[in-house]
Amino acid sequence: RLAGLRALGGLADARAPHLAGHSRRVADLAVRLAATLGWPMEAAAALRESALAHGAVQVALPGDVVAGLPLSGAQRRHLRWAHDRSKESLADLLPEEPLSWALHHLERVDGRGYPDGLIGDEIPEGAQLIGIADAWSRLTASSEGACAPDDATAGLAHLLREAGARFAPHAVEALERLRHAGALDLGGARPGS
């Protein structure tokens, strides 16, 4: 099962060469965030599997949908279609709760996310952690595989500004605690540098 999830993550990562290893980085960071928030080991292990699969929905999407937001009506319909197909495919690999974490990591606490426009605590905590880990990985990715410390600081400042709108404040605070502890991956740079 884990091999299948890694393979799905690899397919999703292949859509954007500068994000090589993205699914693994998201999974690693999501688990560190969960540990910071006191999650039990068993739940953190399920979160890792969910995070490895979080990009599976992107495999079925055209590049213009993957590339950015906001989405047009046609792009949203295609995203819904891809979401539904991913749910069917991942249902054999993930239990119900971890499946919901993978499928809802693009929700926003202000309700403007997708696929369902969930608001605040309606978004499962696992999805919130995958969402912030996904954003951090994307913000700190570079073609060289390392992020300059100034870029990481700017990325963290951006995520802090989005707390309460895009991201759950406690998830952003956990990310900030990891950064201050020197335990935050800077896209290949030495943590804490």
Image (cartoon, grey):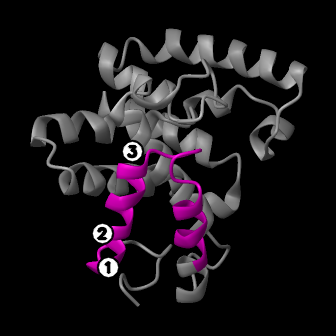
Mark 3–mark 1 Cα distance, whole angstroms, equals 18 Å
Question: Farthest bottom residue?
Answer: 193
Q: Secondary structure at mark 1?
A: helix
Q: 176 and 185: which one is in front?
A: 176
Which residue shows up at 80% across the image and 15% down it?
Answer: 77
Q: Which residues are magenta?
A: 154-183
Which residue shows up at 49% across the image and 44% down it?
Answer: 131
Question: What residue type is disc 3 on?
Answer: Leu
- The secondary structure that dominates the magenta segment is helix
60 sits left or right of 70 in the view: left
Q: Quadrant of the C terminus?
A: bottom left
Pointer 1 residue: 180
Pointer 3 residue: 129
Pointer 2 residue: 177
Mark 3–mark 2 Cα distance, whole angstroms, equals 14 Å
| As drawn, 15 above or below 153 | above
Q: Are marks 3 and 2 in contact (CB under 8 Å)?
A: no
| Residue 174 part of the magenta-drawn span | yes
| As drawn, 187 above or below 167 | below
Mark on residue 143? none
Question: What residue type is disc 1 on?
Answer: His
| 10 Å crowding of disc 3: few (<14), some (14-19), many (20+) | many
Res 36 quadrant in image: bottom left
19 sits left or right of 101 in the view: right
Q: 91 and 73: which one is in front?
A: 73
